[in-house]
Image (spheres, grey):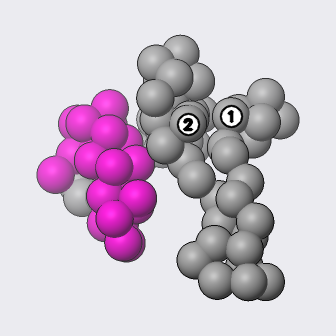
Amino acid sequence: MEHLKEKIRSVPDFPKKGILFRDITTLIGDREAFGELIETLAKRYDNKKVDVVASVEARGFILGGALAYRLGAG
């Protein structure tokens, strides 16, 4: 999992001084890493019946949508 964390870019002082923004677009843009992330998240629920995946905020929609697709959920 550490190699996936390394794919996330850190942007200091964004959007304002003192904030360290974690930019996941670098991870999402890497086909192999993004696929591995979704598989890692899905493993936890492979033996469970998942009807719906709820996700929060803009970046959550990206991960939640991909995870729902992988799990065959809405």
Marks 1,2: beta carbons within 8 A: yes
Give the amino acid at mark 1.
Lys
Residue drawn at x 69%, y 59% as measured from the top left: 11
Where residue 39 appears, x then y in whole percent? 51, 28
Vertical placement of 12 versus 47: above or below?
below
Residue drawn at x 27%, y 47% as measured from the top left: 65
Are there few (<14), some (14-19), or many (20+) residues within 10 Å of tag 2? some
Q: State whether the magenta stretch is mostly helix, strand or loop.
A: helix
Q: Nearer the viewer, residue 56 or 9?
A: 9
Where residue 26 appears, x then y in whole percent? 55, 36
- Identify the image quadrant of the N terminus: top right
Residue tagged by mark 1? 7
Label 1 and label 2: CA atoms lie apart by 6 Å
Vertical placement of 9 versus 20: above or below?
above
Give the amino acid at mark 2.
Thr
Which stretch did the figure color magenta? 54-74
Where residue 43 appears, x then y in whole percent? 55, 34
